[in-house]
Amino acid sequence: MKQESFTIKRELHAESLVADLGIVGGGLSGVCTAITAARAGVKVVLLQDRPVLGGNSSSEVRLWILGATSHMGNNNRWSREGGVIDEILVENTYKNSEGNPLIFDMILLDKVKQESNITLLLNTAVYDLVKKDNDTIESLKAFCSQNSTTYTVQAPLFCDASGDGIVGFLSGAAFRMGAESTEEFGEKMAPTEEYGELLGHSLYFYSKDTGKPVTFTPPTFALQDIKEIPRFRNFNSKEFGCKLWWVEYGGRLDTVHDTEKIKWELWKVVYGVWNHIKNSGDFPDAENLTLEWVGTIPGKRESRRFEGDYILTQQDLIEQRHHDDAVAYGGWSIDLHPADGVYSEKPGCNQWHSKGVFHIPYRCLYSKNIRNLFLTGRIISVSHVAFGATRVMATSAYVGQSVGMASKLCLDKKLQPSGLLNNGYIGELQQNLLKRGQYIPGLKVEDISDLVQQAIISASSELKFNGFSHEGEWKTLEISSAQLWPLSAGKIPLFKTSVYVLEDTVLEIELRGTQRNGNYTPDVNLGKKELKLAKGLHELELGFDATLGMDGYVFLMFQRNPNVQLGYSEKRVTGILSVFNLVNKAVSNYGKQSPAPNTGVEEFEFWCPQRRPHGQNLAVEVPVPLNVFQASNIKNGVDRPTTRPNAWVADFNDPFPQLELQWDIDQEIKRIELWFDTDFDHPMESVLMTHPEKAMPFCVRNYTILDGLGNELATVTGNFQTSNIVELPSAITTNKLIIKMEHPSEKVPAAIFAVRCYSN
């Protein structure tokens, strides 16, 4: 046995790592930053102080991932975030549609481990750093509790995705904690002292039916009197997991340094609640339930926010202000919570929506005083009020992708983060993001290296859309219902439909547009009809003396009338939706947003889709088909519906749908990219909520690519992803590509948003 002499002290095992980008924090934001950077060729070290990735979305916390789609409870159509976070959510829905949080852990770990440019350090916490000068970080120091090793990570660029901003804090980066006053930014939603300045933490639990009676003996630290919680009557035996998001505490404390104290208070509440459910006698249906899981770390909402060259405010969100340096967007409501959390007499949240999505500028994503520090996740440069919307995970992940791509450009140009803006490289950054599926409102892909831009494009068919004939069921008009129509600028067409009237009545029909191009809030009245209808079947012709000034969607609305039935169709088409004046209390949607005076928030109605298998299209037709699904759409630079569907769609009756790309001269082709429809309107919550299908019904599953001589270049079966990149073993020379595909189903025709081809 080896013996060592006595020493005054021993040193821990130490390792030094050198990278292009050091990322601290392995939540969704850090993960998407790392993957985006790594795929661009950046050498990344990703440090995560937990045993798994995902942060609040991991099995340690189990919060569902949401962003601009907001449970489909707002007016943000086709707004699910693109790029890497889209890839992750689509894959999770396909492999894990039941929402198992452990499977989601596995998917995230697998995604990161597939990237050879990422060195992943789990269970590794940053505790110190070294600075090159007052404004520049040289290296990080971290400790892994599992292998008793200290790490030094040296890099020219760093990204703080840690949630509490440990790197920003240690480096001396300017930050804020707590709410700004109304006077500082003119934000009318700035909270009062009574409401509080910070959002608290939450901790969830899961229950399980064992099929036999189960008893429960609470720990001594459990809350004894459940009535200490003003909303104790909201508890029931059916809800668990993040549906209990409002079990929150800590907003009056230091949400960084008091986290352990907050956790113990939340454990006290959770075990007290479960004791009440099991032993009060008020919940006989809980007799066979056991407490299957209780979180061991709380899900954090708010702590430090760091200052960049711009601070995003309430007005940016509500007014949907344009920013030339926009690199991402958000769309969650301004969602603020009372600081006293579960002990507050006030409602658990105070959510106010904007009429559409809002820009997030690049200036918010780096420190204003630490030159080589990127900011991402919930610590970006926003006010407390704006933070209420930007803090959610899908938005944080989207911001992370922007930082990952920006890091590559900084390295290539030998610039610090602010240098991209100051030296005019924002346009290049935006284009790099767009080409990887990161939609930025108002922008489109403009890529001169894309060979498809010079191709002549033809198709075996193009859907001439004249609406939907009645081939489904009749449904009573119990809720106001509308069909979205993508119309070109000019005169509004005539609409035709049939209704079945149960009793003599007056049916109100409206046509509405939107004030802001690209929004889906029906706030412009284009026409209204009140039709006196006798009992029986009626065929209606609906003409409106109105014109559209620019391309966009209009809403043909049928106001609630229990004496009327509408016909529906089982067919579905990319970029076409029915919407309803629904109530979704989970996101403070009560059919209409009616803010109190002087809050700086607008009043408007909510018109939202129903989740599949519901949400069939209304049986409404137009006599002259709409020409909105041309093959040429595949090179228009927009890869999702916006003011138009932006997709080529084949005819339902085309037995062998295909696209043909023809060039005047031979082209050298090495890479082919295809962008399919995975339904950007479906929010794809990652846990707790299940999904009706694994692959989205609009997505082309099977296709083959041929060259001009008929040689097979690639065949794909079972596709479920938005983006397909076909890398050929070696470049080919041809003057033609043919893409043959199958319809996803007899009810959904084949569709593609984009095809791009490159020589290298």
Image (cartoon, rainbow, N blue to C red):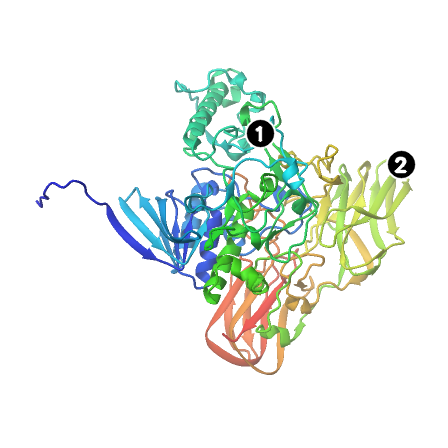
Vertical side of 194 occupied by 535: above or below: below
Could you say which is closer to the camera, residue 408 or residue 73? 408
- Residue position for label 1: 196
Horizontal side, residue 570 vs residue 6: left or right: right
Q: Identify the element where label 2 is drawn.
A: loop
Does label 2 or label 1 sit earlier along the sequence? 1
Q: Amino acid at mark 1?
A: Gly
Q: Identify the element where label 1 is drawn.
A: loop
Horizontal side, residue 681 vs residue 420: left or right: right
Could you say which is closer to the camera, residue 365 or residue 356? 365
The part of the image, by quadrant, that contains residue 182 is top right
Name the front one of labels 2 and 1.
1
At which x and y percent is residue 369? 49, 50
Q: Label 1 crowding class (10 Å Cα cut-off): few <14, some 14-19, many 20+?
A: some
Horizontal side, residue 727 vs residue 606: left or right: left
Q: Residue at x 54, y 16 (%)?
A: 227
The N terminus, quarter of image: top left
Q: Is residue 172 visible?
A: yes
- How far apart marks 2 and 1 lie (CA) works out to 54 Å
Could you say which is closer to the camera, residue 749 or residue 451? 451
Q: Furthest residue to the front?
A: 134
Q: Which mark is residue 504?
A: 2
